[in-house]
Amino acid sequence: MKYNPHFDVDSVLDILRGVNEKYPEGSPEDEALRIAAVALFYVRETQKLEDYREFFRSFYTPAIDYVVVSQTFATREEADAWLTTGKTREGELIRVAGQGFQVISRRNGQGFELLRTPLPEELMKKYPPESE
């Protein structure tokens, strides 16, 4: 299912209302639809809709899409030079010559170093998903 990040809450509530009309009042379906509608209404009224949109998106976005590479370098030397610029943040994921690395603090606490961390596309090549 493709996620629509700009879904209209009123349209969703109208659809829930229409679906709910098909079930007798007091049925389990009626109760479930009312709970869903009121929960969505609550999220909007408490001004948490943007938080909910992000939360909802996480259910329909493959984990691979969450991995964001912040920098790409052709060589390890370029990446090592970048580490000394002061523009790095611990935990950043970078790509060096097609391989993933994570920026970590040195053990002595002075500066950063790179920890080999395979990117999702590397893992997909090495361990392709089984076809159904």
Image: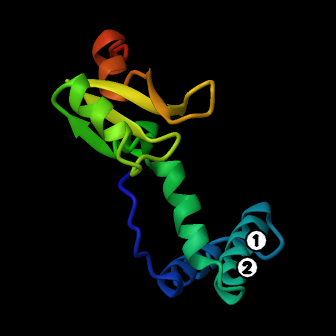
Q: Is residue 62 left or right of residue 58?
A: left
Q: In this picture, is 52 found above or below 10?
A: above
Report x, y in % for residue 119.
36, 27
Specify the label residue 92 is tagged with.
none
Q: Nearer the viewer, residue 65 or 106?
A: 106
Specify the label residue 35 is tagged with.
1
Q: Is residue 60 left or right of residue 22?
A: left
- Residue under the image location 80 percent in, 66 percent down: 27
Reading the image, the residue beneath label 2 is: 38
Q: Is residue 58 left or right of residue 1?
A: right
Marks 1 and 2: in contact by CB < 8 Å? yes
How far is mark 2 from mark 1, CA to CA? Answer: 5 Å
Q: Nearer the viewer, residue 15 or 51?
A: 51
The amino acid type of the residue labelled 1 equals Ile
Q: Can residue 77 be seen by looking at this rendering? A: yes
Label 1: how many Cα within 10 Å (few below 14, some 14–19, many 20+): few
The amino acid type of the residue labelled 2 equals Val
Report x, y in % for residue 88.
42, 46
